[in-house]
Image (tube, helix red, strand yellow):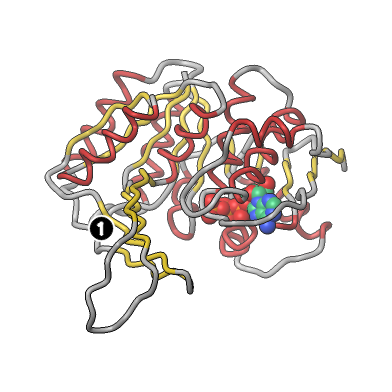
Amino acid sequence: MIFTLTINPCLDRYIYVDELILDDTIRAKKVVDYPAGKGIDVSRVIKELGGVSIAIALVGGNNGRRLEEMLDKEGVIYSSIRVPQETRLNIILESNKGQYRISMPGEKINVKKLQVVLEVLSALVRHNDIVVVSGSLPKGVASEFYTGIIFTLKQWGATVYFDADGDKLKAGLIGQPDYIKPNLHEFQRLIGKHISKREEIISEARNIVEIHELKGILLTLGGEGAYFISKEKVLYTRTIKVNVKSAVGAGDSFLAGFVMKKAEGASDEEALRWANAAGTAAVMTPGTRLCRRADVERLLDKVEIEVIE
Ligand SMILES: Nc1ncnc2c1ncn2[C@@H]1O[C@H](COP(=O)(O)OP(=O)(O)OP(=O)(O)O)[C@@H](O)[C@H]1O
Ligand SMILES: [Mg+2]
């Protein structure tokens, strides 16, 4: 089974207005909510692509209930861990001139709840299961939480995919995940230097693979393609030219495509093909909307995989 873990999910609320006018009542034309948070995104994409996963998430309050409702509607299987704190809300005011994005402050989580996360994982995760650990952490939770969680999952014999930024990425790597999916900015922050040339990217990624004994790095470069880099192999896939509506969730869609195909026993090449198709399909949809299966399937034939090594 594939599990995703989202410790800090949120709810994206799009409010559509004609125009934002100061000191006037603005009538909303439409309000649309989307569940969000990186692990939840991965689970939603896996569902969209016809796969099955279980999203484990910390949720609270009315926003948390709304999030569960939407996952129910989409048919995403989840196991929620209830916390007294309200799940974060992002308000996106979408007018014909552009959008304002307002992120509500998150509340501090009681660290004792983190013990429950471990209990739930221990009850569900079995040898050879796959766990996608990703995203930010709530206030009050140190980055080292990821070290412990990943280390423990590995001890249990799970395959761990990890996607986080900054100190969290560094801390998680100490727990020795199998795969990481940084974008180039995150990767540069990890190694502490700016890189751009292909040779530099490959040699720096190889170095990280070796130090942390990774099975592979999925390094995405936004519109500039993506690499799969392991000890033995370097694959590159070019970005497909499409009409870009919103890059939100592209990385999560990419990761979901890769994880789902690998779980089905596909090769790294085939999994990367699905990853690129899913990432590309995600940028074709507006706002928080992730990829659509029909777009992914249509794009698969257009994806080229270059075997560099
Ligand atoms: N401009 C684009 N055109 C086509 N495809 C794109 C574009 N930007 C991103 N993608 C697709 O999405 C994948 C992931 O993109 P990106 O590197 O932006 O991820 P990310 O920064 O991790 O995103 P996220 O914000 O979801 O974490 C790319 O490898 C590609 O398949
Ligand atoms: Mg990302």
Identify the image quadrant of the C terminus. Answer: top right
Q: Quadrant of residue 15?
A: bottom left
Residue 118: give x, y in percent of width and height: 28, 31
| Residue at 77 percent of width and 53 percent of height | 203
SS type, badge 1: loop
| Kind of residue at badge 1 | Lys
Asked if residue 282 can be seen in this view, the reply is yes
- Which sits in the foreground, 101 or 24? 24
| Residue at 63 percent of width and 33 percent of height | 258
| Other residues around mark 1 within 10 Å, as few (<14) / some (14–19) / many (≥20) | some
Toward the bottom, the furthest residue is 23
- Which sits in the foreground, 46 or 191? 46
Residue 197 versus residue 260 in the image, above or below = below
Q: Quadrant of residue 151?
A: top left
Asked if residue 222 can be seen in this view, the reply is no
| Residue at 35 percent of width and 76 percent of height | 20
Q: Residue tagged by mark 1?
A: 139
Toward the left, the furthest residue is 84
Residue 243: give x, y in percent of width and height: 69, 55
Residue 282 versus residue 268 in the image, above or below = below
| Residue at 77 percent of width and 52 percent of height | 241
Residue 134: give x, y in percent of width and height: 44, 43
Residue 216: give x, y in percent of width and height: 66, 38
Image label count = 1
Q: Is mark 1 within 8 Å of ligand 1?
A: no
Residue 14 versus residue 303 in the image, above or below = below
Q: Quadrant of residue 68?
A: top left
